[in-house]
Amino acid sequence: MDGNLQKQIFKPSACVSQEELRQYLSGGMNREELRRVEDHLLDCPLCSDAVDGFETAGEHATDDVEDFESFRKKLPLESSAKLRRLEHVGYWRQIVAVAAMLVVGAVAYFNFFKSPTGPQLYAKYYETYKNDIPVTLRRPGLSDVDPNFAQALSAYTDHKFGQANMLFERALQMQPDNEAAKFYAGLSLLESNNVKKASEYLNTVANSSGVYAKKAAWYLIMCDLKLDNKTQAKERLDKFLESGDIMKVEAKSLRDKL
């Protein structure tokens, strides 16, 4: 390194003058002057203690103070003086702001990329199944329709699921092989949050070859999600997609999230 440049870099900066001290304490310096004075105060315990003394005494105007050089001579030796600790408020505010942005960003990242829970997926993809049995088959008095089953379907249609549960149970006692009764019983129990028993009915129907088998398979997946059993839901969904007959769009969308 060039010798002159080295001397210039490591040469101690001149102590602040009385006028500079007055401007510093009164806030009359520009940014470059302020930085120079503060850099000097960090390295010069004597000038740093002089500033502390004036601030403590509340004398921010130095016109009435004795000659500044004489005042400095009265200060403690450099070895026993304390360095002034400058607090850059703006700097710390920037740090706090950046930290806050990082926290917000981390939370947003976590919420965006984390895998949704089973109940969250259930809430997104579940829809109440609408009764598709013709009204004529629900009229009391028909020989091939159990009155309890007809009343249960009416209660289900009216979203009176607690009443429907009881009536479907009665209907199945009279007609144990009634696939439609089992399917709607499972749906009604699912609506009533009796998910485990709903799964039993829906699983029986899903493993049959009846008209409600594939529909029951979809709602059986909904049961798994509501129980937060995502692994089993994924296995059932893979089989469901292999058939590819109903709910194709919903099934593919759900599979992407599992």
Image (cartoon, rainbow, N blue to C red):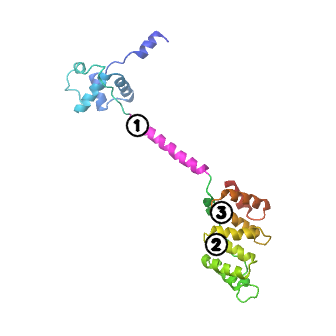
The amino acid at mark 1 is Gly
The amino acid at mark 2 is Leu
Secondary structure beneath dot 1 equals helix
Q: Residues within 10 Å of mark 1 (few under 14, many from 20)?
A: few
* Residue drawn 79% across the image and 59% down it: 242
- Provide the major secondary structure of the magenta segment: helix
Which comes sooner in the sequence, label 2 or label 3? 3
Range of magenta residues: 88-114
* Residue drawn 71% across the image and 79% down it: 172
Q: Number of numbered discs present?
A: 3
| Picture quadrant of residue 106 | top right
* Residue drawn 36% across the image and 25% down it: 42
Q: Are marks 3 and 1 in contact (CB under 8 Å)?
A: no
Spatial CA distance of label 2 from label 1 is 62 Å
The percent position of residue 241, horizontal first and vertical second, equals 76, 59
Front residue of this view, candidates 35 and 130: 130
Q: Is residue 130 visible?
A: no
The percent position of residue 61, horizontal first and vertical second, equals 23, 30
**59 over 215 or under it: above or below:** above
Q: Farthest residue toward the bottom?
A: 141
Task: Give the residue number, with chain letter if any, for mark 2.
Answer: 189
* Residue drawn 61% across the image and 57% down it: 117
Front residue of this view, candidates 119 and 195: 195
Front residue of this view, candidates 216 and 13: 216
Q: Which mark is residue 125?
A: 3
The percent position of residue 218, horizontal first and vertical second, equals 71, 65
The amino acid at mark 3 is Tyr
Q: Which mark is residue 102?
A: none
Q: Which mark is residue 90?
A: 1
